[in-house]
Amino acid sequence: MKLENKTLRYNIESVFDQKREVENLDATLEQFLARLDSGELRSAEPSPDGWRVNAWVKKGILLLFRAGTIVDYSIDKNFQFYDKHNIPLKQIPTDGSVRIVPGGSAVRSGSFLGAGVVMMPPAYVNIGAYVGANSMIDSHALVGSCAQIGENVHLSAAAQVGGVLEPIGALPVIIEDSVMVGGNCGIYEGTIVSKNAVIGAGVVLTRSTPLYDCVNEKIIRASEGEPLTVPENAVVVPGTRPVNQPFAREHQLSIQTPIIIKYKDDSTSAATALEDALR
């Protein structure tokens, strides 16, 4: 019997909040996982007031872990894998809408891949993540648990998009539509990268990272209840700032900080914007 989403939510929250043993939830968790797979349910989603966390969805994912038992998924003695029995690898559609190039990538059940997504090996998409249509996940890139990736996004080689399951109400990393993330970037702790932004290779963004907007001459920071948010069309490159401490001044030390060096317009491609910014 197909359960309505409000019934799934009630079943999950009543067990999770009362910290009861997971029992008689097989149908609930099976349908919950299937709807994460299809993109019908998301751990976070856009709303008129900005991005909203669906805390009950995170509770459902945690219940999946609690309900599961570890089983042997090994192929042979050279490829040994052990994970929860109820969270196998995702079954990729056979209609050709998603392309995963051979070479060691993995997509966990409970994540969504939109039509036209391409994954280069090796890459990993964790449970609860959402990857929009026509996005590219390049080699050694990570899409962490519950991370939300928009449409037409390019995650370059070794880009790391952090995940978060707990705290329950914490916003995951959000990469909005048509964002370019350069190689060896790290985006963590609920950072939001707004539409059409370009994140240059090697940039690291965290909740505690100040973002220096050289165009508008201001500093963008996370605040209580608000994540670090990269504005639309911003072109962000790695920079440094001096450390104001006697030993550091003596040795001319500085620390990494991201800098908005320019804003691109509709006629400027991501590659051109980066090239111009770095000249």
Image (spheres, rainbow, N blue to C red):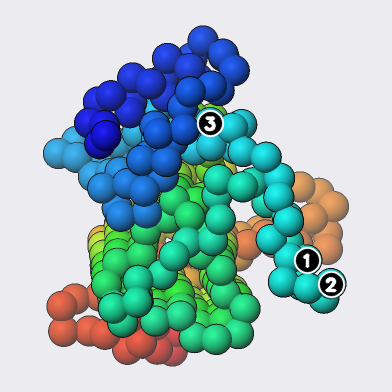
Mark 1 lies on residue: 80
Residue in the foreground of this view, choosing between 204 and 214: 204
Mark 2 lies on residue: 77
Q: Specify which label sits upstream in the sequence, 3 or 2.
A: 3
Total marks shown come to 3
- Rendering coords of residue 187 (x, y %): 51, 58
* Left or right, residue 94 beside residue 252: left
- Rendering coords of residue 90 (x, y %): 47, 61
**Which residue reaches farthest top?**
18
Say few, some or many: other residues with alpha carbon within 10 Å of mark 3 (under 14 / 14 to 19 / 20 or more). Answer: some
Q: Kindly report the distance in space between the C-alpha atoms of the residues bearing marks 1 and 2.
A: 6 Å
- Rendering coords of residue 55 (x, y %): 40, 30
Quadrant in which residue 30 is drawn: top left
Residue in the foreground of this view, choosing between 55 and 41: 41
Q: Residue at x 22, y 84 (%)?
A: 268
Residue in the foreground of this view, choosing between 241 and 201: 201
Above-or-below relation of 59 to 190: above
Q: Secondary structure at mark 2?
A: loop
- Determine contact: label 3, label 1, CB under 8 Å: no
The quarter of the picture where the C terminus appears is: bottom left
- Amino acid type, callout 1: Gln
Q: Nearer the viewer, mark 3 or mark 1?
A: 1
Residue 200 is marked as none
Mark 3 lies on residue: 63
Say few, some or many: other residues with alpha carbon within 10 Å of mark 1 (under 14 / 14 to 19 / 20 or more). Answer: few
Quadrant in which residue 29 is drawn: top left
Q: Residue at x 59, y 32 (%)?
A: 67
Above-or-below relation of 48 to 211: above
Q: Specify which label sits upstream in the sequence, 3 or 1.
A: 3
- Amino acid type, callout 3: Leu
* Left or right, residue 253 beside residue 182: right
